[in-house]
Image (cartoon, grey):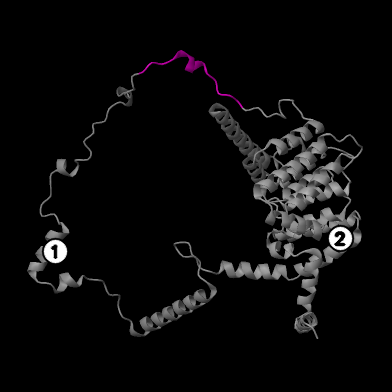
Amino acid sequence: MDDGGKRERESEMLMVDEDPETVFLKTKQQKTGGEWEMFKENVRPLKRGRNVKLLNDALKSHSHMNMSQLKNSLLQTRRKLVEAIDEYKGDDPLNPWLECIKWVQDAFPAGGECSGLVILYEQCVRTFWHSDQYKNDLRYLKVWLEYADNCADAEVIYSFLEANEIGQTYSAFYIAYALHMESKKKIKTANDIFNRGLSINAQPQENLEAAYRKFLAQSMTKPKALADKNSTDNCLPIRSFGSVLSRRENRRHASESSDASRDDSQGNRGLRVPLSIYKDINIRSSSGNEVNMSKTESGLWDSLSTQAERNKENKAVPAKWTSHKIPQRPGHRTGGSATTYIEVFVDDECSGVHQTGAKVGKSSSLQLREGTERDLKRETELLREDPLRNFPISSLPSGKVGVTRRGEFWRRKAVGKTEKRRKNNKNET
């Protein structure tokens, strides 16, 4: 047998000795590539799943290409997709938004602020929230739900969808809303949301019923566990410096204190020992010289001083409060300062300037095309804290206006800093 036959025989023997799972992974790696195995911890999961080939291509480009070249190519492709949104003239204006969102999800597997995905979600849902064409469109509802998954507290989004009757005929809304309330320990509210979806026969009804059965099975033991937790937490003594004793320390401390009090009460009852008064040992057992020394060291008064010495801090003579004036710095006062007025903030929506859906789309694409990486990161953080900060107040559900006002304040503050930075850059150039 020649050398080639020996090598093939040895490789076959090694394949037989290896674990079947290892052999399967090797064959899959040869067919599809193993980039996702190396970077799967940095890949953001999607509910719709991912295409393995596209994922491997994206991860391979991230690992082999120069980072600056990769970043420029991705930004150029995203800019073209955003321009296609503005230039679309068909009957389904939501479709180019969905294509752009899907491409960003595939091109940026790890997500992050630099991808602009959260901003893209917000601009998409804000463009069509008032359109009757997409109120009962499942694709539009899924964009809302994906946007809710990227926010710190999605309850305001579900309240907005319910108040504006968006996606109310689909079970996906009630499942996501109820599970979110369950994660916030609001079991009764989650149960009411499930019952509301079942009462209107939200479709597909099978998914809603299966999710509700799973919710009931999990919530059967939750009230008892929460009650036990609350009762055990309430019985824990709180120390003066704020730390709470553990259960074991609390049990040992309670038993020791009860035993000590029981022993003291029994001993006092049997012996009838009178209460002893504390006396200083040094004064009682020391000599006369030491007593005189302690008197001098303790600063005892040998003679009563005069009233003037005792009240030397209170020498101020009472007078009329208008008789004294605060000294002012010498300077020239301008007459124009007295006529200046404080600029009162006026909201754009309250001033009667309402933006249409097309104008909102233009501003969104402009922000994604011209925004720097720092601007995208700042806007993403603001949207995660207050996802409805750019929506008109008339569209918000009751009780959510304060959240949006707070977001509006931070947005205007961030815009002011951005404009100031741009002016400084222009002056330097």
* Residue of label 1: 294
Residue closest to the far front: 2
Q: Is residue 336 magenta?
A: yes
Q: Is residue 19 left or right of residue 406?
A: right
Task: Give the quadrant of residue 284.
Answer: bottom left
Q: Is residue 25 left or right of residue 306?
A: right
Residue depicted at x 81% and y 32%: 358
Question: Residue 208's mark?
Answer: 2
CA distance separating discs 2 and 1: 85 Å
Amino acid at circle 2: Leu
* Quarter of the image that includes the C terminus: top right
| Residue 407 percent coordinates (x, y) | 65, 40
Q: Is residue 56 magenta?
A: no
Residue 367 versus residue 75: which sits nearer the camera?
Answer: 75
Counting other residues with Cα less than 10 Å from the Cα at mark 2, is it few (<14), some (14-19), or many (20 or more)?
many
Q: Is tag 2's residue or tag 1's residue first in the polypeptide sequence?
A: 2
Residue 4 versus residue 102: which sits nearer the camera?
Answer: 4
Q: Is residue 64 above or below residue 166?
A: below
| Residue 421 percent coordinates (x, y) | 57, 33
Q: Which residues fall within the magenta stretch?
A: 331-344
Mark 2 residue element: helix
Amino acid at circle 1: Ser
